[in-house]
Every structure is written in structure tokens, then in C-alpha cells.
Image (cartoon, rainbow, N blue to C red):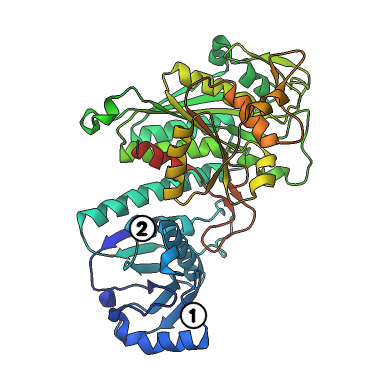
């Protein structure tokens, strides 16, 4: 989709449709005097009241060059923010492209140009890349943001475009089926992305990981014919962008779970719904998407991303329940359940991140079904060993409209991981499953400020939303980028 920021009188914009936000219980802008009677009639009849998600279309509106005039409900102004604007634009894009609109203009009266272009790019994404028939596909071809030509608005527009395209890059990776997104193919995509935006990329292969002693990660990978990879992507700020604050020794590490397909291993999953397990690398994809944005937006601190990429398969070489593996840290783990594999690959990546000099860590992982039981599909579960670090991450998530909820990590939960045969077991029983999984990770970060984000419930949509297609959401890309930019 082509996107442009234009400075032009809204009534002279040539497009299939031009849209504007209308708030609930507020009069329309004075510039809409030519359609005020139509709007009043809509309000009186209850057809359009300005509530969030409502849409009304007027064909051949008097005085407008655009073929259609569209009003989109913004809800109450008191509840309006960038996330609401993003959803309103996305909803309009998805509804109007189904009506044959190819060129849509958005008259920016309220809100941020970044949120407008994000909503459009995210809303236009469809997960149908592998369909051979184009009958159902009705993409928007051009999106115009009609606003002032100030440097501030231009910068916001460009920032929003980078963020949304990076989030869609993540969604594209997650959307790929496991036969087209093996660990090494994910590594290839990471390498290509890094080259495109000017990042350093290193791929640790199986032999190198064995030399280092990543027994926990390699134990998960050993059942698959597809070799594992540890993807390491590095961003270093240009000298001219450094500020006094960035001259500290802070170094942000982003770690993402990259299980390209998860059968559960010997502790095999039920067949129902297993096809969705291609999304078990959504955390790793989010980390890569964030690095794509970070490379272009250039924060003042170094950021290193690590994605342990494996396939968790059943085979003659697959690890068994009861196996004991030795992690990169030297700690031993009794593998009580081979379907608790994400934590096993993450711990070696977290340890390696610290060896690379990362002073602050955030990981994202589709780690547990338990977090979905606790928080549903609305909130990310956030765990930490450092309240200040958690506050940073929560503030970044809130500003980007990615909801997260802090979860406990009391010392008592650590007892769930006791093992008679190794330093700890990889599961903690039925109760508090998301917490015991987070505690397992905590055992390997020491005193390094760390936040774990369990995105199992938020990384995938089983049904489409008015503003977002069914499938991968790309959650955490904006949070990670905001975290780095605001450091």
C-alpha cells in the first residue's frame, strides 16, 4: 500500500473516499457545514451516534472532490487516545476496502499522524498470502493523511509508518507455516532484514552452541531433523545520536522465543488446534520486528536481540521426560514435561545475552496456556525481578496501547520447581503455571534487571477484529521500540 502525507484542503482531495473522526455527543467541525444536515439526520435516527466503531458513508457529498464522505465514530473524547485512533482508522480501512475503496484519505483533525498511518497499515494486512485466488483479496492501494505540513507531523507520520511496517513484518513471519519457516529459514529472514536496515547479524549454529554448552536449548532441538539456530542481531547507536544519558553502560537485551513449530515433543499436544503452533515463534518474531524499527528510529542506547530458534518434534532422538540437561549457566534441569520447551531455550539465550554485555533484559514468549486462563486474550502477563525495570516496560506498553498486567513472583512459588535429581525441574505442577514458568526463567537472570512478557494469549487472534485481521497480531513490537527510544 502506498501511503502519503499531503497538505491540502480536505474538500479538494481526490480519492475514492475521505474520512474524518466524529466524537460522541460533540458537534461536527465547522468545515463540515455542507453535510451538517446529513449528520444531524443520522444522529436523530440513531444510525450514527459517534460511538467507537460506527461508520457512515455519504456518496457524492456536496462540495467534496472525493467520491465518498465517511464519518468514523471516535467515542467519547475523554476516553480517546492513540490506541483508540489506531483502532478507528483500522476499522475504517477494513470496512471500506470491502466496499471497493482503493484510495482512502484521512482528514486529520484529532490525534497523532503516527497512530493514523499505523491503523491504516495494520488494518490493511491480510493473512492470505498463500491463497491462489484473488477474488477475496481487496487490498487498499493508497492511503493519504491530510494534515499540516509541519516537521512535527511529518516526523510522526514517518515514525508511525516504520512501526506499522515493522509490526506487519513480524506478522508475516508468524503467519508462515512451519514448512516454510524452519529455524534456519527464520535465521535467513533475520539476516536479510538486518542487511536491509543496517544491523549486524550473527547466526550460531548447532556446533557452536554445543561448544558453548547450550545443553538446554539443544535438548529441545534434538528431536527434529531441522537444525536449530541462535539468532543474534545487534544495534549500536551512531556517535552523533549519543546523549549524556546514553553514555552510561546500559545495554538493552531483547530475547524472543522462536519455536517454529511445537508438537509438544514426547509429551505431545492434542491434535485439536495443533496447526496454530506455528505461532510459537511470535516472541522471536516480535523481537526481530522491533529491531527493524529500532534500526531506523535510532535510539541512543545499544540493543541486542537474541532469538533461540528450534522445532520441538517427536522422533527417535527426541528428549524424554526424566532427561537431565545442563544449561549454559551450568545449572542442571530435569525435563519433567517436553512441552514446557520454551523456557528451556530461553534460559540459554538469556545467559548468553548477559555474556554479550546486556545489562537490562526483556523477553517475550508464547510461554504458557496458564496465562491465557488468567488474563484471557486482552492482557500480556508481565513478570519481573526489578520494579523499576517493570515500570519502564509497563509505561512503554501503555503508551503504545499494548495492554499488560503485572503478575506476582513471590519466593514461595520457587518451591514448585524443586527436583530430587537436578537443580530444578522444568515445570511446577498444575497451579500457577504461568508464575512457575516465569520463576524458572528468573533462576537464570540473577540480579540483572529483567522483565518476562508471556504473550500466549495476545499474539494470535482466533477471529478477526474490526480493525485487525485474524491471525498474528505482532504484539510487543511497539512496546520494545518505545522502550528503547525512551531509555
Q: Which mark is residue 48?
A: 1
Tag nearer the camera, 1 or 2: 1
Compared across the picture, whether 264 is left or right of 57 comes to right
Give the side of residue 439 with respect to residue 486, left or right.
right
Asked whether the viewer can see residue 226, the reply is: no
Residue 358, above or below 21: above
> In the image, what residue occupies the spot 33% across and 30% down?
301
Residue 225 image point, x, y percent: 67, 25
Per the image, label 1 sits on a secondary structure element best described as loop
Quadrant location of the C terminus in the rendered image: top left
Give the crowd class for mark 1: few <14, some 14-19, many >=20 residues within 10 Å: many
Q: Which of the two residues, 168 or 56, is positioned nearer the viewer here?
A: 56
Name the residue nearer the viewer: 100 or 235: 235
Q: Looking at the picture, does residue 427 appear above or below residue 68?
A: above
The residue positioned 62% from the left and 21% from the top of the image is 217
Measure the C-alpha gap from mark 1 to mark 2: 30 Å
Q: Residues within 10 Å of mark 2 (few under 14, many from 20)?
A: few
The disc, 1 or 2, on the residue closer to the chain's N-terminal end is 2
**Residue 361, image x, y percentages:** 47, 28
* Residue pointed to by mark 2: 2
Q: Quadrant of residue 105?
A: bottom left
- Residue 241: name its quadrant: top left
Return the residue nearer the eye: 313 or 403. 403
The number of numbered discs placed on residues in the rendered structure image is 2
Location of residue 347 with respect to 282 vertically, above or below: above
Q: Residue 21, relative to residue 266: is it above or below?
A: below
Looking at this view, is 459 or 211 the one in front?
459
Quarter of the rendering occupied by the N terminus? bottom left
Viewed as shown, does residue 368 lie left or right of 39? Answer: right
Amino acid at each position: 500500500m502506498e501511503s502519503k502525507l499531503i497538505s491540502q484542503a480536505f474538500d479538494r482531495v481526490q480519492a475514492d473516499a475521505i474520512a474524518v473522526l466524529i466524537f460522541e455527543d460533540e458537534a461536527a467541525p465547522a468545515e463540515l457545514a455542507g453535510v451538517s444536515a446529513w449528520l444531524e439526520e443520522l444522529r436523530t435516527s440513531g444510525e450514527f451516534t459517534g460511538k467507537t466503531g460506527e461508520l457512515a458513508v455519504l456518496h457524492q457529498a456536496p462540495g467534496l472532490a472525493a467520491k465518498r464522505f465517511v464519518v468514523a465514530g471516535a467515542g467519547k473524547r475523554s476516553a480517546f487516545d492513540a490506541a483508540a485512533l489506531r483502532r478507528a482508522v483500522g476499522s475504517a480501512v477494513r470496512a471500506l476496502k470491502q466496499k471497493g475503496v482503493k484510495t482512502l484519505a484521512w482528514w486529520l483533525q484529532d490525534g497523532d499522524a503516527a497512530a493514523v498511518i499505523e491503523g491504516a497499515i495494520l488494518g490493511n494486512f491480510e493473512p492470505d498470502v498463500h491463497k491462489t485466488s484473488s477474488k477475496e483479496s481487496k487490498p487498499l492501494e493508497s492511503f493519504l493523511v491530510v494534515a499540516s505540513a509541519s516537521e512535527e507531523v511529518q516526523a510522526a507520520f514517518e515514525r508511525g509508518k516504520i512501526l506499522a511496517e515493522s509490526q506487519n513484518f513480524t506478522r508475516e513471519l508468524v503467519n508462515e507455516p512451519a514448512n516454510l519457516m524452519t529455524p534456519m529459514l527464520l535465521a535467513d529472514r533475520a539476516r536479510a532484514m538486518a542487511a536491509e536496515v543496517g544491523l549486524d547479524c550473527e547466526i550460531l549454529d548447532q556446533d557452536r552452541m554445543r561448544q558453548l554448552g547450550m545443553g538446554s536449548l539443544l535438548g529441545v532441538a534434538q528431536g527434529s531433523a531441522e537444525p536449530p539456530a541462535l539468532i543474534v542481531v545487534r544495534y549500536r547507536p551512531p556517535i552523533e545520536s549519543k546523549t549524556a544519558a546514553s553514555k552510561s553502560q546500559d545495554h538493552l537485551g531483547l530475547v524472543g522465543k522462536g519455536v517454529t513449530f511445537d508438537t509438544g515433543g514426547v509429551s505431545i499436544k492434542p491434535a485439536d488446534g495443533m496447526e496454530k503452533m506455528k505461532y510459537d515463534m511470535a516472541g522471536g518474531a516480535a523481537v526481530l520486528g522491533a529491531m527493524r524499527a529500532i534500526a531506523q528510529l535510532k535510539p541512543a542506547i545499544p540493543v541486542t536481540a537474541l532469538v533461540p530458534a528450534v522445532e520441538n518434534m517427536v522422533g527417535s532422538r527426541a528428549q524424554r521426560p526424566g532427561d537431565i540437561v545442563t544449561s549454559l549457566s551450568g545449572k542442571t534441569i530435569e525435563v519433567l514435561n517436553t512441552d514446557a520447551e520454551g523456557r528451556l531455550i530461553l534460559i540459554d539465550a538469556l545467559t548468553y545475552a548477559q555474556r554479550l554485555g546486556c545489562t537490562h533484559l526483556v523477553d517475550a514468549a508464547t510461554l504458557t496456556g496458564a496465562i491465557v486462563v488468567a488474563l484471557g486474550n486482552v492482557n500480556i502477563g508481565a513478570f519481573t525481578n526489578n520494579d523499576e525495570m517493570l515500570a519502564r516496560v509497563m509505561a512503554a506498553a501503555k503508551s503504545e496501547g499494548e495492554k499488560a498486567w503485572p503478575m506476582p513472583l513471590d519466593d514461595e512459588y520457587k518451591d514448585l520447581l524443586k527436583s530430587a535429581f537436578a537443580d530444578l525441574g522444568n515445570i511446577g505442577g498444575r497451579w500457577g503455571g504461568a508464575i512457575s514458568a516465569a520463576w524458572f526463567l528468573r533462576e537464570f537472570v540473577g540480579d540483572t534487571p529483567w522483565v518476562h512478557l508471556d504473550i500466549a494469549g495476545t499474539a494470535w487472534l482466533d477471529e478477526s477484529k474490526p480493525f485487525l485481521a485474524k491471525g498474528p497480531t505482532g504484539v510487543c513490537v511497539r512496546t520494545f521500540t518505545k522502550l528503547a527510544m525512551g531509555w
